[in-house]
Amino acid sequence: MPFNHHAEHRHHIPKPRYRVTNWREYDAALRRRGSLTVWITDEAIAAWRAEPRTTPGGQPYYSALAITMALTMRAVFRLALRQTEGLIGSVIALLGLALTVPDHSTMCRRSRTLELPPLRRAETGPLHLLVDSTGLKLGGAGEWLVEKHGTSRRRSWRKLHIGIDAGSGEIVAIELTEKDVDDAARTGALLDQVSEPIASFTADGAYDQDRVYEAVAQSHPDATVIVPPRSTATLSASAGIAPTRRDQHIHEIAVHGRMGWQKSSDYNVRAKVEAAIGRYKRVIGDALRSRTDKTEATEVAIAAAALNRMLGLGRPKYVRIV
């Protein structure tokens, strides 16, 4: 049946329009994102050489901070490892520094065991966690080749699970898994990355599972779970005596409708995590450049830290006009 067959019966919700009120500051922040001085800091240059190790084994020449800076440059400017090596070498030469450049093999090898600091948000106050997932492609045939000759069996992708702060938009939890991993199954892993108390946990209908409510209650007993129940959801056996949070959602939807529940529960703020995913794919890309599980995990963690740093340079402030 054609898509527009019942178009006259559908609800037509006008798309809201917004205006940026701090365009001058936000415009300057957008330009700073491409500045090399933002990514190559004095701290990285001062701590370029690694500290001597006290355990048996070879002595690392480059510090973890130097390798992290190099991989961050790779993620931000979408470069291959060899091109990253060339860019860093040219910057060091222009600055006149007596530093050696980590070669592409060293960067690849060190990324397997690189320990990165946990993601932290800059703001304070209650943390309203928004969670969602998306797919990242692996290297392979491009869209033209797939359309021309059909989908290749070797073409695959990974699933990126992401959690952001609703207030600042910063990424506070991130994990990369196989494509067939259920979204709800990684709720506990994302919550373990958050050290601050969570005021609310918001996700889409894929997280409407008992283990999600249990994982949130175990880690953050005072957090409110805002997940839309499926259309066939029924009340629990104890709904009349001690209703659960899910029972309350089902009751509110029955009384006020799903749209009314979304407005009263502030569920629509979940759009911010979709915006964060879109920002990840626009800035970093929708494909992974690494080829092993450990290097892929390092790649997405560095990308998340880079996106948080970009937000720290300046964020837009919106005012709805329509």
Image (cartoon, rainbow, N blue to C red):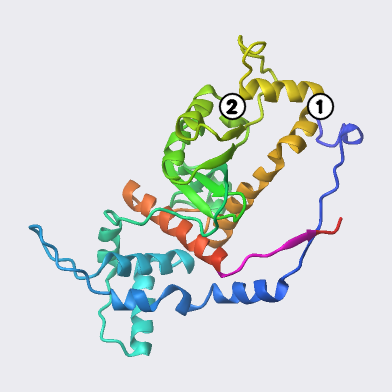
Q: Amino acid at mark 1?
A: His
- Residue at the limit of the structure toward the left, as seen here: 56
Q: Nearer the viewer, mark 2 or mark 1?
A: 1
Percent position (x, y) of residue 200? Answer: 59, 39
Q: What residue did someone put label 1 on?
A: 256
Q: Residue at x 58, y 59 (%)?
A: 282
Q: Residue at x 25, y 68 (%)?
A: 63
Q: Is residue 116 left or right of residue 205?
A: left
Q: Is residue 49 left or right of residue 213?
A: left
Q: Amino acid at mark 2?
A: Asp
Label 1 secondary element:
helix
Which residues lie in the magenta part?
A: 313-319
Residue 314 forms part of the magenta stretch: yes
Foreground residue among 202 and 73:
202
Residue 119 forms part of the magenta stretch: no
**Label ID, residue 208:** 2
